[in-house]
Image (cartoon, rainbow, N blue to C red):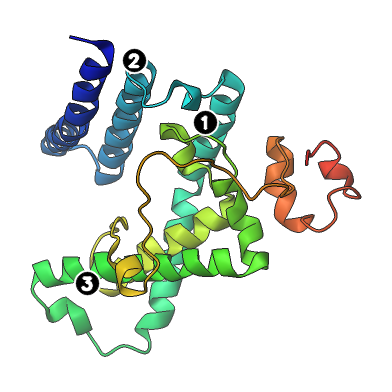
């Protein structure tokens, strides 16, 4: 069996295998009394490790496997995401408490659980859809979102490359909407709102290029990336970003 054929089989079998395995691991941990937050964290890290290993063993494009320096930087973004989770939940609680003042008593909590789950997922995703869209349409918001689109290669770890401010508005929406419905926190994974609002794009094959628009200024140093939104219009004069590259 040729290498390309075997790699194709691995690629097609990997996704369902990882999904099923992660559900099994999460259920085993739950039965053993592990806290929900730790179940999610352990399962996520195991899935991330499995995908990272597969990217090295059977990559779709070897050029997308990052050098150590880039992977190390994305590891810092992953650590920041973990550290900011409690802050995001607090923000979500605050947003939910504020919005609850305008809602009728109990409200959606009287609905069947299945409907509450659907509402939680779709409404949280609607909030994140509009935040994401506004972040692309308004330059001052895109300053905080640009880091997510700066990488010139796609691999498992840089999906969490988010500026802390960008991360907090995502976490806040994820936490606030389900709390309003009396549910736990759910992630947002749907494409339905792109279909509804006409922004869905699914080009065939690999993208020709990744990253920001050609000629866009963006720093490569981590400290400079975190401060980039504050010095976006004056890179050459900001001493903290003196090593930023165009």
Residue 111, percent across and down?
Answer: 11, 78
The image shows residue 77 at horizontal and vertical percentages of 54, 38
Crowd class of label 1 (few under 14; some 14 to 19; many from 20; radius 10 Å): some
Label 1 or label 2, whichever comes before in sequence order: 2
Instruction: State left or right for residue 39 relative to residue 219.
Output: left
Closer to viewer: mark 1 or mark 2: 2
Q: Looking at the image, which residue is at 53% across and 70% down?
A: 134
Task: Quickly name the residue at label 2.
Answer: 57
- Assess whether mark 2 and mark 1 are in contact (beta carbons under 8 angstroms): no
* Residue 181 seen anywhere in this rendered image of the structure: yes
Callout 3–callout 1 Cβ contact below 8 Å: no
Residue 56 in the image: state x and y as whole percent.
Answer: 39, 18
Determine whether, in the image, residue 148 is placed left or right of residue 114.
right
Residue 109 is drawn in which quadrant?
bottom left
Quarter of the image with the C terminus is top right
In the image, 66 versus 228, the foreground residue is 66
Q: Residue furthest top?
A: 1
Q: Which residue is mark 3?
A: 119
Give the alpha-carbon distance from disc 3 to disc 1, as whole Å. 33 Å
Pick the front one: 32 or 82: 82
- Residue 75's tag is 1
Percent of width and height locating residue 222: 68, 37
Q: Can you say whether 75 is above or below 166 in the image? A: above
Name the N-terminal-most of marks 3 and 2: 2
194 or 111: nearer the viewer: 194
Visible residue check, residue 179: no
């Amino acid at each position: 069996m040729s290498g390309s054929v075997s790699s194709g089989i691995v690629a097609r079998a990997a996704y369902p295998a990882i999904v099923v395995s992660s559900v099994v691991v999460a259920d085993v941990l739950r039965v053993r009394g592990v806290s929900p937050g730790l179940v999610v964290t352990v399962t996520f890290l195991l899935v991330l490790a499995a995908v990272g290993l597969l990217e090295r063993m059977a990559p779709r494009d070897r050029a997308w496997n990052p050098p150590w320096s880039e992977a190390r930087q994305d590891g810092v973004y992953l650590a920041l995401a973990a550290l900011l989770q409690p802050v995001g939940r607090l923000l979500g609680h605050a947003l939910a408490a504020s919005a609850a003042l305008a809602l009728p008593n109990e409200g959606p909590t009287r609905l069947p659980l299945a409907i509450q789950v659907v509402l939680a997922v779709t409404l949280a995703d609607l909030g994140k859809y509009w935040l994401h869209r506004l972040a692309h349409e308004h330059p001052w918001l895109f300053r905080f979102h640009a880091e997510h689109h700066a990488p010139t290669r796609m691999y498992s770890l840089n999906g969490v490359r988010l500026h802390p401010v960008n991360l907090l508005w995502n976490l806040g929406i994820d936490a606030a909407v389900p709390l309003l419905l009396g549910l736990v926190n759910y992630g947002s994974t749907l494409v339905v709102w792109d279909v509804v609002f006409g922004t869905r794009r699914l080009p065939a094959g690999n993208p020709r290029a990744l990253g920001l628009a050609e000629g866009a200024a963006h720093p490569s140093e981590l400290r400079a990336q975190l401060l980039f939104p504050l010095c976006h219009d004056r890179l050459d004069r900001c001493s903290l970003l003196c090593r930023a590259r165009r």
